[in-house]
Amino acid sequence: MPLSAVFHTSSLQKQVAALSDAFAIAGEFLHCDVINSGHINMTFRATYRKPDGTTRRYIFQRVNDAVFPCPRDVMHNVEKVTNHIRWKMLRVLKTPFRQTLNLYSARGGRKYLEIPGSGFWRCYNCIENTHTFDVADHPRQAYEAARAFGAFQQLLCDMNPEDIHETIPFFHHTRRRFDHLEKAAAADSHGRLNTCRKELDFIRRRERYVDVLLDLQERGELPVRIVHNDTKINNVMLDRETDKAVCVIDLDTVMPGSVLYDFGDMVRTMTSPAAEDEENLDKTFLRMPMFEAVVKGYLEAARDFITPQEVSKLAFSGLLITLETGIRFLTDYLEGDVYFKTKKERHNLHRARTQLRLVESMEEQMPEMEEWRSKKIWRMVGISAIMF
């Protein structure tokens, strides 16, 4: 039976089992589990029994072609980046990575499989004895995750950004995000505007933030680098016993951009004790010990390539990316939840409210954030004070 027919007529377990032959996975398929942590792609962890009786697990993932209209470009980027990292790992002795993501070849030698009617599929190695966190419980976790993302950027800093496709155009173009929100509010296509006017007004009062980094980029003061673009703490696998960083995952949004967007998303996702969709806003605030850990971990890995201008905007980038994410959630809510997966009524509105409350907390603590960035951290990581 053709693989496309299996995907249209069989159960989920049989569908994933059918991928084994397509990706030449050795062993007997036992079962698969659904991984629900991501907002975008469909992800499954499949277990196989090898001929010697041991088991091995693989990750199968379907690329969301509604979010990524050119899946081949996504796979081009992922293959380029993983190959480059593996090459660098042969030459770099000190790195926080114990393992790297590896793509398995499908029939025909490509690193993906296109199933008519069922989209693009790929197969990764499963990074064992690791776990992830949606919220950092201890500064050490935030430090390790930030250091891993800094090391990820460092490993890619000698790649030509022109070799990587822009899979989501203007992904961190905050002005375009702001204007898109205004259009969604004006259209009010799902009749939701009256439920979120307070949040919309909050964002409008902060329009002055949206062009700050864009203006620096326009003047050539921020270098273009290959960056991750989705540096949530749960995109770093941590060792289950030591909580040391093992591997950066979820590479679909790797694109040319600014390291400040990556750093800002670290601050957004690693400093608050609340989940991204927490409805009790009293639980949402920036924890300074976590911010300090993020700065320290990141700069320890990035200090060899980061510029003074980039360092000067570290604290601000956290505020900006948190505001931008709130804008994205609110836009998706107004447009009928077409981008982010939702699990409950008004889910994207709750997500937006959490981000905007975190923006408030960052505004309140910005003087302390800037002080830590400018006066303390350089002594700890050996960066010359002249950078500040």
Image (cartoon, helix red, strand yellow):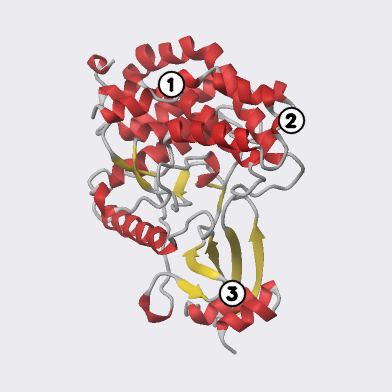
Q: Give the x, y percent position of residue 129.
A: 55, 54
On the rendered image, what quadrant is the N terminus found in?
bottom right
Q: Secondary structure at mark 1?
A: helix
Task: Name the residue rendered at 36%, 47% in the picture.
Answer: 255
**Residue 207 vs residue 261, the one in the foreground:** 207
- The kind of residue on which mark 3 rests is Tyr
Callout 3 environment at 10 Å: few (<14), some (14 to 19), or many (20+)? Answer: many
Secondary element type, mark 2 = helix
**Residue occupying the point 29% across, 40% down:** 225
Q: Residue 7 vs residue 103: left or right?
A: right
Q: Point out the tag, 3 or 1, that comes first from the N-terminus.
A: 3
Disc sitting over residue 365 in the figure: none
Query: Residue 195, labelled with which disc?
Result: 2
Residue at 45% x, 21% y: name it: 209
Residue furthest right in the image:
345
Q: Position of residue 167 (x, y in %)?
A: 40, 52
The three-letter code of the residue at mark 1 reads: Phe
Badge 2 or badge 1: first in the primary sequence: 2
Q: Is residue 365 above or below residue 86?
A: above
Q: Is 265 displayed left or right of 165 in the figure?
A: right
Question: Nearer the observer, disc 3 or disc 1?
Answer: 1
The residue that mark 3 highlights is 48
**Which of pointers 2 and 1 indicates the residue nearer the eye?**
2
Q: Amino acid at mark 2?
A: Thr
Q: Residues within 10 Å of mark 2 (few under 14, many from 20)?
A: few
Q: Residue at x 41, y 73 (%)?
A: 105
| Residue 107 vertical position relative to residue 172 in the rendered view, above or below | below
Q: Secondary structure at mark 3?
A: strand
Q: Are marks 2 and 1 in contact (CB under 8 Å)?
A: no
Q: Splitting the image into 4 quarters, where does residue 3 fall?
A: bottom right
Spatial CA span between label 2 and label 1: 29 Å
